[in-house]
Amino acid sequence: MSKIASSSGKKVNRIGLELQPYRGDKTTLCAGCGHNAISERIVDACFEMGVDPSRVIKLSGIGCSSKSPAYFLGGAHGFNGVHGRMPSLGTGAVLANKQLMAIGTSGDGDTGAIGIGQFVHLMRRNLPIVYIIEDNGCYGLTKGQFSPTADLGSKAKTGVVNELPPIDTCALAVEMGASFVARSFSGDKKQLTAVLKAALSHRGTAMVDVISPCVTFNDHVGSTKSYAYARDHDEPLGEIDFIPHFQEIDVEYEPGTTHAVTMHDGSRLILKKLESEYDPTDRLEAVRVLHETSRRAEFATGVIYVEPDKEDFIEMLNLVEEPLATLPLERVRPTKATFEKILQELR
Amino acid sequence: MSSTGVVAQDATASSSSRQTVNDFNIQVATVNGSGSQTANLVLFRSIFKMGIPVSGKNLFPSNIAGLPTWYTIRVSRDSYLARKPEVDVLVAMNAATAREDVMGLDSGAAVVYDEAMDLSTVRDDLIFYPVPFASLVAESCPDAKLRRLVRNMIYVGVLAKLLDINLAYVEESLDGQLGRKVKALELNQSALRGGYDYADEHLSKRDRFVLEPMAKTNGKILVDGNNAAALGAMMAGVTVVAWYPITPSSSLCETLIDYMGKYRVDEETGKATFAVVQAEDEIAAIGMTLGAGWAGARAMTSTSGPGISLMAEFTGLGYYAEVPAVIFDVQRVGPSTGLPTRTAQGDILSTAVLSHGDTKHLLLLPSSVTECYSMSLRAFDLAERFQTPVFVMSDLDLGMNSWMSEPFEYPTGQPDRGKLLDAETLKRLKEWGRYRDVDGDGIAYRSLPGDGMPTYFCRGSGHDAEARYSERADDYEENLKRLATKFETARDAVPGPVIERESEGSIGVIAYGSSHWAVIESCDQLHHEAGLDLTYCRLRSLPFNAVLNDFIDRCERVYVVEQNRDAQMLSLMRMELSPERIAKLRSVLYFGGLPLDARSVTDTILASEGSELAPTTSA
Ligand SMILES: Cc1ncc(C[n+]2csc(CCOP(=O)(O)OP(=O)(O)O)c2C)c(N)n1
Ligand code: SF4
Ligand SMILES: [Mg+2]
C-alpha cells in the first residue's frame, strides 16, 4: 500500500507523507489503556488511506477518551469541547467548511450519558463525521464509576454490581438512522484498522464503537469490559477486507464466500462469511444480530450496518460548493437594490 | 408643542365639548387564536399610512387558543412610542374579560363591542357603540365556517368610520397583509365594508377621539425588532445559524430563514450560501455556533433566558478558547413556568458573567428596532474582532412588537473578520502562538481549519500562549490577565453610552434597551409636570467606558431605570465604579411583565425627589 519511499528513505503514503505527521503528542493516558491502541489504529488508518491531516478536524468531548485527539494527527486542527457535546461542535464546524474531514472521539459516558441527546440527533442528521466511542463501560477520568454501557451484573473494582441494563450504542445508532455502524475491539489490530478505513471512506456519519478496556478501573475479573472478557466474547461477523478506491483488487475471492459493499467513494468493503450469511446493508438483520449476540452475553464486531449512498446533512442543506466560512462578501451580502426592496416591503 | 393633544372642537362634531386629536390609545381585547392579528395589523398600518406616529403592542398569554389577549395601538402626535396604560378606545371582543376591561377605563372612553354582550349598562360615563357582529359577519361571509376568520375585520371597519381613517389606506394595508390570498382578501374586504357601512348608518360619533392626517411617518418603516435583527444578521453575512424555538426569540430565526431563502440562494446554482439548523436544544445550538465560529464562519444563535442558562457552559468555553459567536437574547420574564410571553430585562446580570471561572462578556443593548438592526450587524464584527461570544440583549417588547423607524442603512465597507493569520502576518510575526499577545491589545492571531496556516489544538482554559496543554499556575494567570486586557480593549470598541437629553439640571437618569421610550417620555412629563429637567444617558453596551463615569460625575443623583426587580445593571455598575459614583445611583425598577410606561418612571422619580420641588407652570 505504501511502497514509495521519501528522500529520507522512510515509507511514504499515497499523498507523499511519512508516518510522522499522522502521529500526535505522547500519550498521557495509562499504559495499556485501550484508548492508546485506538489512537494508534487511527494513525495507521489515516496514513494508509492517505488522509490529508491539514484537512482534518479532530473533535472530542471530555473524558480520558476525549483526550485522544491530542495523540494522533498532530498536524491537524483539534477542538476539545465540553462533556457530551462534541456532536454540536462538529456539526457547526463541518457546516462552516464542508471540505474538512471530521474525526471525533468520545467515551461511553460522554456519548451514552450526558451526550446521548446530541448523539442521537447526530445519527439522525447523518453529518459527515467519523464518530468513535472508546467504550470501557466506566467513567475513566472520574475514577471508575459505571457508565451507561456497563453490562447488567458487571462488577466494579470496588465490588459494586451494576444493576441497570446497558445502552447498546450500536443498536441505538441503527435505530436512529445512522448510515454506518461498526463495533470493534481495541485489541483487534487488523479488524479495527479495516473498520476505521471503511469509516473514513464513508460519506455521512460513521459510528464506530470500540471496546476499549480501562486498565486502571475496569479490567478485573467480574468486569464485562476487561481485556480477558472482550477476547472471550468478541464475535466477529466475518473477517473484513477493506480495499480503498485507489487500490486494485489483487485477491481472488471464491464466489459465495464473501459479501461485498461498495462505499460511496468507490472503496470496497469485503466481508468474508463465517458460518452464517450476514448482509450489513440490511437494517433489520443488524438489529437482530445485535440483540441475539447480546442475549448470549457476547458482542458482535465488524461493520454491522452500512448504507453507503444515504443523503448526508450537507447535501440535505443544499450548500454551495465552497466553504461557507470563506465565501466572499458579495456572495453573503445582498445588493443595495435588494436591500431597498426589503425596506420597501416594510413601509 | 402641545403635548396634551387637547384642542378645541369644531362646530360640526359631536356633543362632547372637546376633541382629542392623534393622541390616544386603542385597545382590542380578544381571545387568542381568534385570528385578530390580521385585523389589528391592518388597523395599525392604516393609521401609520395617515402619517401619524403609532406603536403597536401585543399583550398575549402563553397559550395557543382560548385565553385573553390584548392588542394596543398608541397614536401619538408627539411620537411617544412607549406603552400607555390608559385605554381611550376599547374594542371589547372577549366576553370573559369585557366587564373588567370596561371597568378599567377612564371616564369618557369609547367602547366598541359586540351587542350580544349587553355592556352598556355597566357604566354610564362611557360612550358605547354596540355592533351586531353576528349578523354583519353573516352578511359579508356566506360560508359559516370562514366567519371566524373575518369577524375581526368588522371592528376595523367600524373604527375606520368612527375615527375617520381613510378607507383607501385600510384597503391598502389589508392588501399588504393578505396580498396573494385572493379569497381571504375578498372576504375581509367585504367584512371591512360591512363594519364601515354599519357605523356610517347606525352609530353617531359621540366620543372625543379623532385622527387627522399628519406628515410624521413619511419614508419610515414599520418593523419588529426580531425582523430587524434578522435583517442585520443577513446583511452581516451570517452563514451558520443554529437555534431552538422559544418565545419571544423564535421569530428572529424564522424571519431570518425566510430572508435567507429569498435572498441568499446562489442564482446560478440554486444552492444555499448559508446553513440553518433547528438544533435539539440550546446547548446544541450554541455548540454548533461555536463549532462554526471556530472553523471561521459568521455564526449565530438566538434564544431567551431559559436557553441562555443552558448555554452557560459552552459560553465559558467560547470565552476561554476564544471563539467568535453571536447570541441574541430576546429577554422575557423568568423561567418557562411563569410569564414566558411577557417582557423583562431580567438576564442582564447573569449574561454579563455567564458561565464559570472568571468570565465576562460583551453585551450590546439595542433600544430600538433601528439598533436591533445596526447592533446585529455590529455584533458579528465585534465577535470576530475580539474572538469571543457577543450577546445582543433585546427583549419581547422590542423583538415582537411593531415599531416605526427611519429606514435602515445599507452597510458600507468590509466586515471586520478580526485577526486572522495569513502568510504575510506569519512572515511578520516570524513565530506564531495562538494565544500570544503580540499587539498588546490582548487579541491574538488565529488560524482556521483548512486555511493552510499553522494549526493548533483548541481547548478551554488549560493552555499556554502556544495553545499547548498546560496546568501551570503561571500559564493560567497569564492567560487570564491577557483576557482581561482584551476586555479593556473592548471598552472603547463597543458602542458607548449616548447622552440622549441634555439639561442644566444636576439630576441624571440612565436607561438601556426598551426602557428608553418610557424614559424619554418621562423626561418630558417631569419637565411639564414638575419643572424637573433630567439629563439622560443611554447605555448601549457592556463593558462600560469613561463616558458613563463622566456622566455620573456631572450629576448629583442618577436614577437607573430597569425592567427587573434586583437592579441588575446597577449591580454591574457597583462591581466596577468608584464608591463616590456608586453613592449617587438610585434605582427605578419595574417588573410587571408589561412594556414599561412613562408614568411608572415619572411617579417613582417624583416620589423620590420629594415635595421640595414645587410644580411650575409652563407656557
Ligand atoms: C458537565 C460536566 N459534568 C461532569 C464532568 C466530569 N467528568 C469528566 S469526564 C467524565 C466521564 C467520562 O467518562 P467517559 O466518557 O466514559 O470517558 P473515559 O474517561 O471513560 O474515557 C465526567 C463525568 C465534566 N467534565 N463536565
Ligand atoms: S483511567 Fe482508564 S480510561 Fe483513563 S487513561 Fe487510565 S486506563 Fe485509560
Ligand atoms: Mg468510559
Image (cartoon, coloured by chain):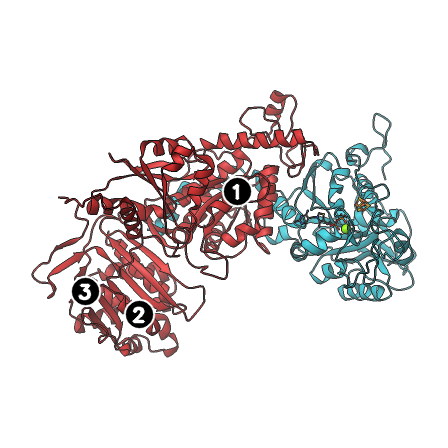
Secondary element under disc 3, as helix, strand or loop, is loop
Q: Nearer the viewer, residue B36 or B178?
A: B36
Residue A345 percent coordinates (x, y): 36, 52
Provide the letter of the chain coloured cyan: A
Q: Residue at x 53, y 27 (%)?
A: B441
Q: Is mark 2 within 8 Å of ligand 1?
A: no
The answer to whether residue B283 shows anywhere in this view is yes
Give the residue at mark 2.
Answer: B100
Q: Would you call the spot at circle 2 few (<14 residues within 10 Å), some (14-19), or many (20 or more)?
A: few
> Which numbered disc, 1 or 2, marks the residue that appears first in the sequence?
2
Q: Amino acid at mark 2?
A: Glu
Q: Is mark 1 within 8 Å of ligand 1?
A: no
Badge 1 and badge 2 in a common chain: yes
Residue B586 percent coordinates (x, y): 36, 43
- Decide: is B378 above or below A308: above
The answer to whether residue A320 shows anywhere in this view is no
Residue A201 left/right relative to B444? right
Q: Could you tell me which chain the residue with mark 1 belongs to?
A: B
Give the residue at mark 3.
Answer: B108
Q: Quadrant of residue B188?
A: bottom left
CA distance separating discs 1 and 2: 43 Å
> Which numbered disc, 2 or 3, marks the residue that appears first in the sequence?
2
Provide the letter of the chain coloured red: B
Q: Nearer the viewer, residue B309 or B177?
A: B309
Give the residue at mark 1.
Answer: B353
Residue B271 percent coordinates (x, y): 56, 49
Do labels 1 and 2 touch, CB within 8 Å?
no
> Which numbered disc, 3 or 1, marks the residue that appears first in the sequence?
3
